[in-house]
Amino acid sequence: MTAPQSNRRAGEQRADDHGSIVLRAIDLSAAFDQTEAVSDLTLEVREGELLAILGSSGCGKTTSLRLIAGFEVPTRGSLELGGQLVAGNGRFVPPERRGVGMVFQDYALFPHMTVLENVEYGLRGMDGKHQLAADALATTGLTNLGGRRVHELSGGEQQRVALARALAPRPRLLLLDEPFSNLDLALRAQVREELRDIVRQTGTTTILVTHDQEEALSIADRVAFMAHGRIVQIGTPEEIYLQPATIDVAEFIGDANIVHARATNGTVATPFGSFSVEARASRVAAVIRPEDLIVQPGASSTAADTAVPATVVDREYYGHDQVLRVRLQDGTLARVRLGSRERFDPGDEVTLSLANPPLLLADHDQ
């Protein structure tokens, strides 16, 4: 099987992309106790871009960020920042000389200092540090909180202090390590929207590490999906979601119904009809997003092989939409996402059909 033409290989740039390259990593790798945590990281990040590195815990995301920041020494490969080699070929530039700002997962704020003192701490020895700190507080909406102690702040305000401290030296690259993980769900969406607006307002090139696919898709210009220490796919949020390169990407990013099937003579049969595949394909995974399934009440009254009878098993209601779990006649369970106005209950007979054809991927796991 071949990936859709609009997909890009890991680290690959569009020929017509605008903006200079702020970061270029080539085959960057790191190993600990003979275990490779990051393998052949190849990545380019443009000026002003917000890139999200997305993946499950332990996939190598944070190690990648630490390699870029200079907190870890790569075992091989090279890294350039602003066109200057900072790691590789016998050269290693320490973190304090890379011009990189970082917001840690726990924010790493000093509780005995005020907000202003926390921001100024990262400006030690710099000319005009008071003005730089004042500018950073203004940018993050903290001007009126400069005299407060950290323990007097809400979680969202503490996150903005950490961001202000990282932005104050005006870094050429900002690194964010799971910056929203300490916030409750109600606050998380608001704070990530504020962060997106701030980094775009300042034009700061940013790399965000997260395990939350909603965070990555909602604020990033591009998303790099990482698994087992490697970048599997990189692209816009739309490309990553609508055209996943592998089954792992499809299952991790968003909700997906995966139908495993064997192909014969260039055709694969699914419960929703038969589809053409490459003649050499033998095992295929059909990826069907829940929102691409149309549900109608009652048993099918048509002979079309794309109209599939099913029974509602349960229902998850979210207000803005709902998800039905249905069982096809062959026992297959599927998830269907639809608007909140229609009412279906467990035991209801329904008919399913496809709004869009499934994405067909090579199935190497079967």
Image (spheres, rainbow, N blue to C red):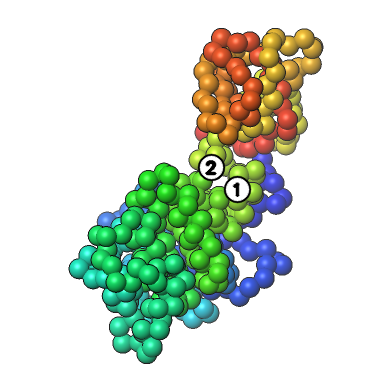
SS for tag 2? Answer: loop
Q: Quadrant of residue 31?
A: bottom left
For the residues labelled 1 and 2, say whether their Cβ atoms are less than 8 Å apart: yes
Foreground pick, 107 / 245: 107
Closer to us: 63 or 346: 346
Q: Dividing the picture into quarters, in which one does residue 297 lie?
A: top right
* SS type, badge 1: helix
Depth check: give the residue in front, 256 or 181.
Answer: 181
Query: Which quadrant is the C terminus positioned in?
Result: top right
Placement of 119 over or under 126, stated as above or below? above
- In the rendered image, the vertical position of residue 198 relative to residue 96, given as above or below: above
Q: Percent x, y for residue 25?
A: 50, 68
Q: Is residue 43 left or right of residue 298?
A: left
Going by the numbered disc 2, the residue's amino acid type is: Ile
Seen at 23% across and 71% down, the residue is: 113
Residue 194, percent from left and from top = 49, 59
Q: Which residue is mark 1?
A: 240
Residue in the image at 69% along x and 10% along y: 298
Considering every residue shown, the one lying at the far front of the view is 144
Mark 1 packing: few (<14 Cα in 10 Å), some, or many (20+)? many
Left or right of 108 on screen, residue 274? right
Residue shown at 26% from the left, 71% from the top? 114
Question: Image quadrant for the N terminus?
Answer: top right
Q: Position of residue 346 (x, y in %)?
A: 54, 13
| In the displayed structure image, the side of residue 91 where residue 223 appears, left or right | right
Mark 2 — residue? 253
Does residue 193 appear in the picture of this structure? Answer: yes
